[in-house]
Image: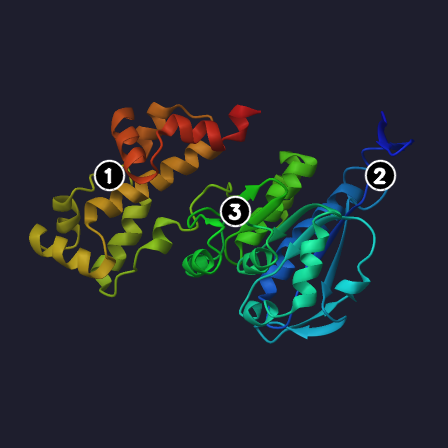
Amino acid sequence: MKQKSKRRGSEIENISPNSRTRRIVMVAFPDAQIIDITGPLEVFGRAARLLTEERGWHVPAYTVEIAATKAGALTTSSGIRVIADRSIAQVRGPIDTILVAGGRGTTTALRDRAMIEWLRGSMRRTRRICSVCTGAFLLAEAGLLDGLSATTHWRQCDRLAANYPAVSVETDPIFVRAGKIFTSAGVTAGIDLALALLEDDHGRDVALAVARELVMFLRRPGGQSQFSVQLSTQQADREPIRDLQRWVADHLGADLSVEALARRAAMSPRNFARVFIREVGVTPGTYVENLRVEAARRRLEESVDGVDWIASACGFGTRESMRRAFIRTLHVPPSSYRSRFNQKLSA
């Protein structure tokens, strides 16, 4: 395999592409969210095994370690303990990627000046620094997010914006990149971020292979919403409406007018519309349109199917109807959305 030359000072170091190890350091603290810690580290650990066992790498592509203010056991918010390999003061040498966990222990960690100063000083020694969930507060406290865009768990976006007005907080994305700094939304979004970092390092094929190993349904692009329609709307308490919600999601190409849905629920259209709004929180028309947009969005991301076909399959009928719905809900037309998020077409 052809080697690449890398200049470091006056020396030239020959580095084989499959013999380079990247060091990943996860910064944790008591009462951190355990998935914030283990989720991203599992991505890098799986990638290292994949590349050595199946792709012929001579050394692990990644090493992972946990660092905290003090080495040793710390209890996460779920009550499960993890072991910090070393204290942050003992973390010496170059670091490829720093990840900062979040969780309810963030409030106490913000008062840990040693940790905040360590994060501030680490900007010079790492290729990229990332936060998961409310770990963004620690980066903001260190001044690393001043003048940059960032995100965090949807429940904490307003608080992040209020406490750190120099940060431009984006409430919707799964993760946000600002130069060498990455911030992600809550909990499992840290896995999405880690997969995106892995793709930056080793390409889409490796990232998708790891996602499949983790049984990830979809590696979500960073600009995608933190919520699916099913998460952002209410599940109805009344059985007929709840059953109807499940049926609609599986029959987006059907007649989903208020009249048709009312007949299926054995209600008058007027009473159905009133009950649906009370139970779900939005009108039937808005609910159906949002589900159709979500289905079309995923097809635009994952397939090379034509826009006309997607519009028909998702129940819009015409390309123009889908375009209007996309602009109403996502503020971009389908063509722009696809060009941004479909890597099969942009490759």
Q: Quadrant of residue 336?
A: top left
Nearer to us: label 3 or label 2: 3
Position of the N terminus, as image quadrant, is top right
Label 3 crowding class (10 Å Cα cut-off): few <14, some 14-19, many 20+? many
Separation of marks 3 and 2 at Cα, in angstroms? 29 Å
Query: What residue sits 46% from the left and 46% below the top?
Result: 173
N-terminal of the two: label 3 or label 2? Answer: 2
Q: How many marks?
A: 3
Residue occupied by mark 2: 19
Label 2 crowding class (10 Å Cα cut-off): few <14, some 14-19, many 20+? some
Residue occupied by mark 1: 254
Asked if residue 56 can be seen in this view, the reply is: yes
Residue type, mark 2 in image: Ser
Q: Quadrant of residue 253?
A: top left
N-terminal of the two: label 3 or label 1? Answer: 3
In terms of secondary structure, where does tag 2 sit? loop
Query: What residue sits 47% from the left and 60% below the top?
Result: 163
Residue type, mark 1 in image: Ala
Residue occupied by mark 3: 175
Residue type, mark 3 in image: Phe
Nearer to us: label 1 or label 2: 2
